[in-house]
Amino acid sequence: MSDIAVRFYELGHRYSLSRWVFQDYRAEVARGSTFALLGPNGCGKTTLLKVLLGALRPAAGSIEVHGRTAFVPQLFQVTFDYSVLDMVVMGRARRVGLFSQPSMKDEKACLIALDRFGIADLAHRPFHELSGGQRQLVIFARALVSEADILILDEPTSALDLRNQGVILDWIHRLSREEGLTVVFTTHHPHHARAVADMTMLMLGERRYLFGHTAEVMTEKHLHELYGVTLKRLQFEHDGRMVETFVPVHALGSTGVAVETAGTLLK
Amino acid sequence: MTDLALAENGATEEAKSETVSSARKHGWAVPVLLGVGVLLAMIASLCLGAYPMSFGRAADILFHLALPVPLPAHPPWNIKELTVVQIVRLPRVLLATLAGMGLGMSGTALQGMMRNPLVGPDIVGVSSGAAFGGVMAMLFDLPPIGVIALAFAGGFAAMVCTYFLSRLANRTSGMALVLAGVFIGAFFIALVGLIEFVAPDSQLPSMVYWLLGTFVGADTKKVLMIAIPTLSGGAVLMLLRWRINLLSLGDLDAETLGINVGVLRWAVIALVSLIVASQVAVSGVIGWIGLVVPHCARMLVGPDHRRLLPAAALLGALFVLGLDDVTRSIVQAELPVGILTALVGTPVVCFLFWKTQGKGWEHE
Amino acid sequence: MPKTIEHTVGQLTWLGPFLCIGFVILALIRPSPKFPIPNHYRRVVDASGAPVRVALPFRGAALTWGISAPEYIEDTRAPGVLIHGGGAAARKWFARQVISWIYPKVLKDDKVWDPKPTAYAHGPYAEVEKLMAFNPGAYLGIGGGPATLLKRAGLPALCVRCGRGKNWDDEIFATARVMTALLGDPQQGERLIADYLQTFKDLENELRPSTIPEWPGVLIMGSMTRNRNHLYVKSVLNSYRIYLPPAAVRNASKGWTGERQDAERILAMDPDYIFLVGVKEPPFATQGPKEFMKDPRWRGLKAVREKRVYRMPGSGPGGLAGLIFQPMWVRWMAEIVHPDRLQPKVRKMLRDRLLHQFGYHITDDRIDAQLHLDENRDSAGYKRFTRDYRPVEKKEPAK
């Protein structure tokens, strides 16, 4: 088996004949690395994920996926009020015969996975009652028991509060380092990609993209081109280590300049 | 660090998890109790009727009849009692039981597969399609296998139409499916009306009465007609029941978990159509059961289809058997059970509608 | 490991009820229970040709779907062994028949009649249990209906007519033969049939239908009072058809007609005579001649202009009267249509035959009621059916 987990080759997709969503995309993601997909709304991130998952057939080019994928959707809702354990057990679908039910062994594996995420005590709680972060972890546990090699996350942090964003990012990091999983995720937050991704792809336009190591790809210039917003690179010291992040700087009408997170203009 | 973040909610969780898992704790005890309940209800139903019969006597006769050994030479019962049980009442009781099982199972499977707790065989148009096939078969005087085949074809066609129509709505929201079912159902009801219009006078009354849903006139032939598809199709559905959990997650999710959603979905649609068609072919359209019973079963054993599907089958049997007993005994004139189920079912469905509206059954 | 066991049990619980129900279904495949052969029995061959053993002493008859109590009594004269005559509707129907005047006790006997309406309309098997509980000596039925199932269970069920005859005559002969054989007096059936045939022969001799060049067209129909658009026409294929040639009339209706008939087609048929069937009493009352002739829809009809509309005696919403009454009503029709060829004999015939067959003296009032004199009095030529009618006018032109 090669060391490549995912490879795009001249990949393209379109919903109508006239308009390509993206075209001629090339990328290679090594096994065990973390790959972030960045782009503005409507640039085709979700479409690319669907192609990656095999739910859509690419209209042009080819895609290679080496290994089993597990998907964590952006907003996970279920119609029926399954318990957490029921949800996690579903990850075992590949290992359970067509006409059989999961065994005690399967359930035990699920409990171990839940324990790994520190939520074993939630096993018999209804999935509905969990918080957004807890749900994400349950789906992570499900991905773990499904013995997937590639974890695909659609905006894993978008619906979470700041603290839980941190928890999820930490787990993305740990899963790729400790479990050797390849993680592919999309995000709107450049600093999240900067924090955990080894490789990053910026989806600039139909044929334009940038792909490479996160540190190389994510520059103020590129990000400005991507979002049409000025992003400032900030470096500061935290706990004795240098940290780098990106902060958007919005022009707010007559008041001059405001910074998205920091609030208002300082004289 | 991560555990800390989540443990914040943990304090209140212990109390909650106690009540929540209660359904799971006696998860398998409920189906056992329901199974015993169904058998007792069957025996009790054998006691109802113009000819007097005690519970013990009915149980005794049923036990001896069901054992695959010859009947005793000098039985404690008289021959009229045996005739009443074997030829008159048992076919009807079995018909009601099997129809209820079939409707309970198919309703549950449909709700799971379509991820929508507001559907049932009659809502997505399967029943209307099967009814159309049934009246066609009656018009041409087809043998039982022909009736089932046409009813199956009609039910399957209606279901496929509904499914694709709801897909046209682009988002598989709950309401699109229900609306598509209403459209397709209305179309097939119109076709049924057309057949009724061209049917000769001699066939019309029996068609109309059959369409209302009735277990009157049960005999061995009809029981076999419903039993073979319901028990065999139901057994396959039972084996697939855990996969319905997966189907209920949504296409993309289920696909990435490694199951073949397309094949599985069509298999479930075909099985449901078969079961509903056989029910409609022998006893006409019996509405609402397929919608209401899964909800009641979910209250008893929770949403996991591994426990839900058997429970819904048994609860459906109990439900229909009970309603048929009511039409046979309390409501003296032989009221078609389909009318009674609609009368009882509609308020329940309204209640469910009110309750589920707040919940997130419309999503994606 | 009890948890593993619980797990397995949990997974297989559904199988239990499935298997139980499967076993119970197998019970239906067993052969039907066989009733023991009675020690003393009478062997009766029913209309389908099947021999039936009827235990002696005879415990009585229960009527099932398709057989009416007047029919049974007319053929057997044995109201005492009638165990079940039918439901509430059958009792009402019985009360309208002449037979109920002759045997008023049957009408009053609550044991014979079930107060609940019968459910035969809801399928052939609806009433089987009730019938079994009556425990009679024999069940009488027609092809299909509960009798078939009772017979399969080995109970003494007789099919008195099975739709095998070429026409209605064959069917009512078969009925008379099976019923009288059941009561152990087959000769009585033959006597009834011979008498019936003789009456028709007498009519033929007097009327000589073959010498009448053109037979008038008649329409036997009904029109509900509650819903005037609900029209019913006895078609050319109806059982009534064989009683039209002996009266030297032809059916004016064309093609297959039935429940759903519209007024326009009746206007197109334009019969010479209209005979109204159905009952006077609500809820299923049908229009009488007076009401019918007033109906603006029918103003253009030839029969209405010439007041040739009559309510038929002895006919219900579909049933035919049996062996004794049928020939009299045919003569009644013939006398109306061909008054010049026939002596007015209907009143006398009714009186004589009831006396002869049942030893019953019918009063003039009751004859009037049977002939619907109250309704038919104003219709053309109905004077001859009044009690004080003397056929004098006919002789005058001869002088």
Image: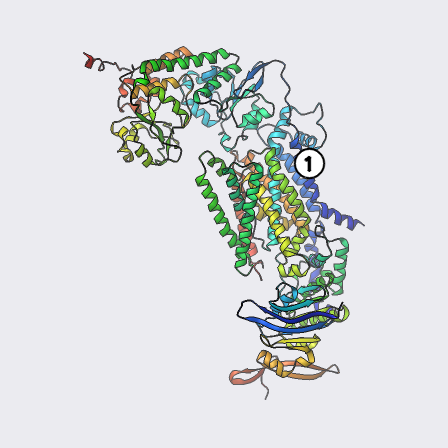
The residue type indicated by label 1 comes to Phe
Picture quadrant of residue C252: top left
**Residue B329 appears anywhere in the view:** no
Q: Is residue B108 above or below residue C371?
A: below
Q: Is residue A38 above or below residue C29?
A: below
Q: Return the residue at label 1.
A: C23
Mark 1, other Cα within 10 Å: few <14 / some 14–19 / many ≥20: some
> Which residue is more in the foreground, C274 or C94?
C274
Task: Using the image as rendered, state which of residue B37 and residue B234 is in the foreground.
Answer: B234
- Give residue A34's position: percent from left, percent from top: 71, 72
Position of residue B176 in the picture relative to residue A117 (left or right): left
Identified at 68% across, 55% down, the residue is: B20
* Quadrant including the C terminus of chain B: bottom right
Task: Locate residue B77, reporting x and y percent.
Answer: 67, 25
Quadrant of the drawing holding the N terminus of chain B: bottom right
Could you tell me residue B238's position as x and y percent? 67, 47
Residue C360 vertical placement versus A171 (above, below): above
Q: Position of residue B97 (x, y in %)?
A: 62, 39
Image-based side of C71 in relation to A53, left or right:
left
Q: Nearer the viewer, residue A140 or B130?
A: B130
Q: Secondary structure at mark 1?
A: helix
